[in-house]
Image: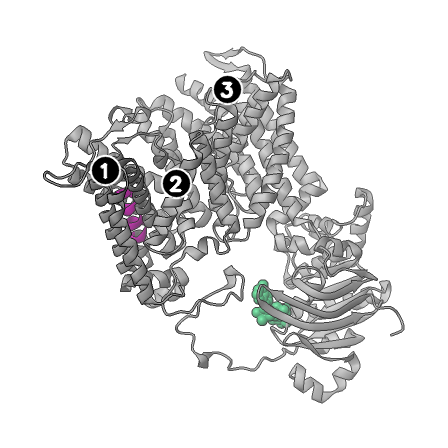
Amino acid sequence: MSESRPVRAAANAALVLALVLVPLFFEPFRVTQFTQILVVAIAVAGLNLLTGFTGQVSVGHSAFFGIGAYVTGVLIVHAGVPMTAAIIAGTLSGGIAGALFGIPSLRIKGTHLAIVTLVLAASLPAVLSTFSEITGGTEGLRVPRITPPRGSFLAADQTRYYVVLGALLLVVLGVFMLDRSRTGRALRALGDNEIAAVTYGVRPMRLRIGVFAASSTITALAGALFAVTSGFISSTTSYMTIVGSIVFLTALVIGGRALLAGPLAGAAIAELLPAQISRYSPEWANFAYGAILIALLLLAPGGISSLRFRRRRSHPAPHVLPAPLQQEETPHDTDDTRDQAQPTTRIG
Amino acid sequence: MPLVPLLDVDNLHARYGQARVLHGVSLTVSPGEVVVLLGANGAGKTTLLRAITGHVERTGSIKFAGTDITRASPAAIVSLGLVQVPEGRGTFADLTVQENLRLGAYTRRVTAAALALEISEIVERFPILGERAGQRAGLLSGGEQQMLAIGRALLARPRLLVLDEPSLGLAPTVTRAVFDTLRELHDEQGLSLLVVEQNADLSLGIADRAYVLEAGEIQVDGPAAAIRDDAGLRRAYLGY
Amino acid sequence: MLALQLLVDGVGKGAIYAALALAIVVAHRSTGLINFAQGEFATLSAMLTVALTGLGLGVWPALAVAAAASFAAGALIQVVIVRPAMRRDLVPVVIMIGLYVCANAIGQLTFGQNPRPLEGLFPAGGLVFGGIRVQWSLIGVILLQAVVITALTLFFVRTKIGLGFRAVATAPEASRVAGIPVERMHMIGWGIAAALGAVAGVSLTNLGVYVESHMMTTVLVYSLAAVTIGGFDSALGAIVGGAIMGVVESLVTGLVPGVSGDVGILVSLTIIVLILLSRPQGLFGRERVARV
Ligand SMILES: Nc1ncnc2c1ncn2[C@@H]1O[C@H](COP(=O)(O)OP(=O)(O)OP(=O)(O)O)[C@@H](O)[C@H]1O
Ligand SMILES: [Mg+2]
């Protein structure tokens, strides 16, 4: 927040350049690992959109990821749909599912929304194993992977990396532009003070459903790309289960509010740290996810509300009040409506 | 005041997070005394009472009956006999009147039989509580809830009863009844009282001494009668 | 006839859902939080019971020890992990998810992957009643829940601590003013919830389920639906909601052809969404401002 705009732009440019160069210097095994991190970063960017604009938390994004992955995979494998079309279909399916959940999320908030999204996350593996004839259930589904275009000098792993990187950059650019647009302002106003926002003509219903749908679309895109870069999906793939939601949330909390660096850093740490631990066993990795998330939340000062996108031009408010009481200044609160009366003592 | 004060607050600072509300407040209540605390909205009266009873972050020194309670927990403070009737009464709306009263004695060790006897004494003073014993407290009227709140506080066996705006939201006649009750408790049982009130006239009428709090500092302190009779003081600080 | 048999089986399952739902309600009443890890806690309790019987303890004493240990562990977790996060917007929700994953991983790490049966609490065999089979264990499980619920009700209504617990649940600030140790009540609430979970988990094994790390995953979903139906603060609602979910699950999976047990989860999801949309306080809960 403190550094100036040119400095931030330069830092982002350097980050993008580094991301572009990375696959040229690492062996395929590493590049594949980095690709996976980029996939998670896209999913986190999707979650970031929801939490950043609305302050709501979804623990069901693993389901949107899974929908994206499975619609893509099943269309390619069983229906012979071309890969690009399948990815688009998978992404949009996640968006539609998200819009469906966006409707109840208008009224269901906080803990209640968490219950709904948790049950959603728990439902996906159940649905997958119910329709195991087409999904492969726990046995899984082999999906053809992205291959380099003919005549390209890129290796397969590098091609996959660049496709995912391109998608991530597009997503981040989209979120960035949304954040600066009229809609973005309306969304932030809505998050700050719904009643005031409505008086300015903001339409909460469309915006809320829209944000939920956009968020799940992005996460479904991550799922679709996961299917065609990893080549194998199953109902026990951790991203499709509640563990996936934990990974995304952990990455979100680690990465914070920054649009590009946040999801990336979060995804990198959330992917690499437990992977390091899971040399011993995958259960340790799951334990690590939970423990890291709990520790971060207990130690991080801001918690979830610090993940909200800030209003531009407003200086960071001094934290004079405990969080629930703290409100940013509202634009219609001008000086002449305040302090008209001297404090007086009522007389009985 | 020849006696050692029952409550001795010295140089008390209190804050909510970064927001400092009290800046070095000193105040005493002697045994058997009725003290009223006046001040405009937002002066910090509620904060002062909450700091004394252990509910707000605080520094300085608070002694009660010779014990330093600056760092004591709210429960420990109640069991020493410093009992508060909070702003807005703080009754348990979902519990019955009877259960509310039983909760008053929560910090004490009493047998069920002894507690029943004590509750019947309270009910003698506030007969309405007996009639409504099995009803949810949330269904009582404002005045009845204030009676319940006072009755519950009495069951904690207070030596000093601290009340935050007992007249809040009550009709004038009900307010008068509440103050009559407080007066009686003081006269009959020698109960010490520290009362925050917006109704300066009425509260000064039952008080021995008064403090005026403004922006977190004590501005005026003196015998209640003197403050009531000083037109300049009244205009400057009490606005009437 | 089939429908009646399914109804009986459903009530048995419903008793388990009710037991876990009750645990969730008790934890929610004490701290205003939905403990998503409640089911996983129950799994760990059941695993502990298996381990204790392995040491030669009878199954009833093992259950008693496991319930006591669960009480202590639940209370400890409340103090160490939940309390520091309680007043912070949405942080506890995410922490509950973290607890869920951690508890599940601990189960897998300590107990291993192989499902193991637990000795029955009740004699084998049962009654045949006009063509309907009723196992003793099913009757036993229902009676056990009834005993537990009665004891719990007496505790809340008759004892001083129970009264204090209810006071804290309805008005934490006023409780503090009255000198009730609010933090201790939160701790006790989570302890009781974990002990109830132990009973739920072990009861489930008496309906033929083996102990393994995912034994409570779907039970949690049904119990969350039960809690949503009954209202997050209503013990009676949890019991009725549990029974409803047990019967719904049994009928849906038994009567609709080609539907496996897992799809019952989707039914739960639908029920949860519909209830939260139309009557968020549940059928038995009183309307009240959300606390989180
Ligand atoms: N929980 C809180 N968090 C932050 N600030 C608070 C809190 N409670 C009170 N304050 C602030 O502390 C100051 C003093 O408030 P307090 O409630 O003590 O005043 P008061 O004298 O009791 O007023 P009133 O007559 O309106 O009851 C006010 O500026 C108020 O905004
Ligand atoms: Mg006040």
Q: Is residue A118 left or right of residue C187?
A: left
User: In the rendered structure, the residue with mark 3 lies on which chain?
Assistant: C
Q: Residue at x 74, y 87 (%)?
A: B230
Q: Main secondary structure of the magenta part?
A: helix
Q: CA distance from mark 1 to mark 2?
A: 19 Å
Identify residue for label 2: A272
Badge 3 density bin: few <14, some 14–19, many ≥20, Cα 10 Å: some
Q: Secondary structure at mark 2?
A: helix
Q: CA distance from mark 2 to mark 3?
A: 42 Å
Identify residue for label 3: C207
Amino acid type, residue under disc 1 in the picture: Asp
Amino acid type, residue under disc 3 in the picture: Leu
Q: Which residues are magenta?
A: A210-222
Q: CA distance from mark 3 to mark 1?
A: 50 Å
Q: Position of residue A152 (x, y in %)?
A: 12, 41
> Does residue C105 lie above or below B150 as drawn?
above
Identify residue for label 1: A157
